[in-house]
Amino acid sequence: MRPKDKSLNKITEGPIVSGMLSFFTALLLGAFFQQFYNTVDAVIVGRVVGADGLAAVGGSAAMIVSLFVGFFQGLSTGASVVIAQFYGAGRKKEVSKAVHTSIAIAIAGGIIFTVIGLLTTSWIIDAMKTPEEIVDASTAYLRIYFLGMIANLVYNMGAGILRAIGDSKRPLYVLIISCFVNIFLDLLFVIGFKMGSMSVTMGVIGVAVATVLCQALSAGIVVYMLAKSNDSYRLDFWKIKVNIEMLKRIISIGLPAGIQTTMYTISNMLIQTAINEIGKNATAAWAAYGKIDVLFWMMISSLGTAVTTFAGQNFGAGKIDRVHKSTRYAFYIAFVITVPLSVLLYFYGEIFLKIFVADRQVIDIGIMMIKYLAPFYFTYIGVEVLSGVLRGMGTALVPMLITLSGICILRVAWILIAFPLNKTIETVEFSYPLTWITTTILFTIYYIYYTRKHTFY
């Protein structure tokens, strides 16, 4: 809940470093528990069902899930920014309108995504050149996942609302509960009901059902928290409807972010397709690496969310100096967490890989992937921090264009031109540092230009 005394709001008042670290830590723990139960899925599937099951859950299917959910998370960023700005400015009526419009968007979006997903799953799986051995399992996983899309989006929007007003602890509690419930259900379905020993497809179905049930639980808890609040962000079910003015505000920020996330995912889907062409072992290794690689992504994305909230609330409160201090401190924090993580993964990546797979060939490919990419993680920091700050300040179109050109278009061009000439994993992987460095440079240039043009200093 929002402190009664505005001076107690650690986002708009007080030391920035301690406030940001506290907020970031709660977000990171939330991301950790969210990833933890995703990891449990992968461990159970990889160990009980086998490499084919891991590839089915973590390969093409994971990319498609990211495409749909990523777009909505980008769109929900617009809602979070709008709510954060109004909340920081103390405009309670606008906060309420934005909250109810946001939940309405989540429900409508869930229905639309469910229908689209169920109708297109088979076609997309085939278009991504998914290895024949895992087509059935990947298709089954996706169809079940899409049946839980409404709950998924409602949870994401509700948690985003709580974080926008500075509450990162309660979404964390929800994730902790869901995490342990998911572990229990995974074990129950895959091992207890012996679905994992029936076939690859049945094992994957067990994991998918457990995931959807946990998403429904998370959505229910978050909705309850919003409904029981006495603050301006209270959710009244009879007020859930679209306010056109708020919808325009949310879309103006969220749609570019959603498109940005979608194009980013599409470029990654192209990469997944290229990996699939190399073979089943490469697909399994890429899936396992993805479960390890997420350590970096959950850290940097949590920091991006934190700096977006700080920028949004302080921008709404007219405290521009705190916006820019938040930017600097976010960079410091990012380097402190990224460099040690890169070193850890580079030298001890094999230990992490063995958690997911036992196949020696798959592990060797995964080690090569880690040693190639981990040293370049720091080059992505500027993309996450600067795009988060700019969104918090209310500008989303140019950041979208920068990401589309620096990451998506360049990455797609590289895969379409370079990969056919040299079909190796190294060729695919080079697309990441190439696009990270390019996009960081572009964001730095635009951030300097934007701040000087608007004379914020």
Image (cartoon, rainbow, N blue to C red):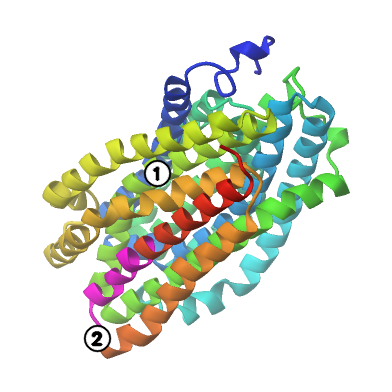
Q: Which mark is residue 169?
A: none
Question: Callout 1: 10 Å neighbours few (<14), some, many (20+)?
Answer: many
- Name the residue rendered at 35%, 44% in the picture: 40
Q: Amino acid at mark 1?
A: Ile
Q: Which mark is residue 422?
A: 2
Image quadrant holding the N terminus, namely top right
Residue 385 location (% of width, % of height): 45, 45
Question: Callout 2: 10 Å neighbours few (<14), some, many (20+)?
Answer: few
- Name the residue rendered at 24%, 74% in the picture: 425
**Residue 134 versus residue 29 in the image, above or below:** below
**Residue 378 versus residue 62 in the image, above or below:** above
Q: Nearer the viewer, residue 282 or 396?
A: 396
Secondary structure, magenta segment, majority class? helix
Left or right: residue 87 compared with residue 197: right
Q: Nearer the viewer, residue 160 or 325?
A: 325
Could one spot residue 200 in this view of the protein? no
Q: Is-magenta flag for residue 427?
A: yes
Which residue is label 1 attached to? 300
Magenta part of the protein: which range?
A: 423-436
Residue 351 location (% of width, % of height): 14, 47
**Residue 259 versus residue 7 in the image, above or below:** below
| Separation of residues labelled 1 and 2 (CA atoms) | 31 Å
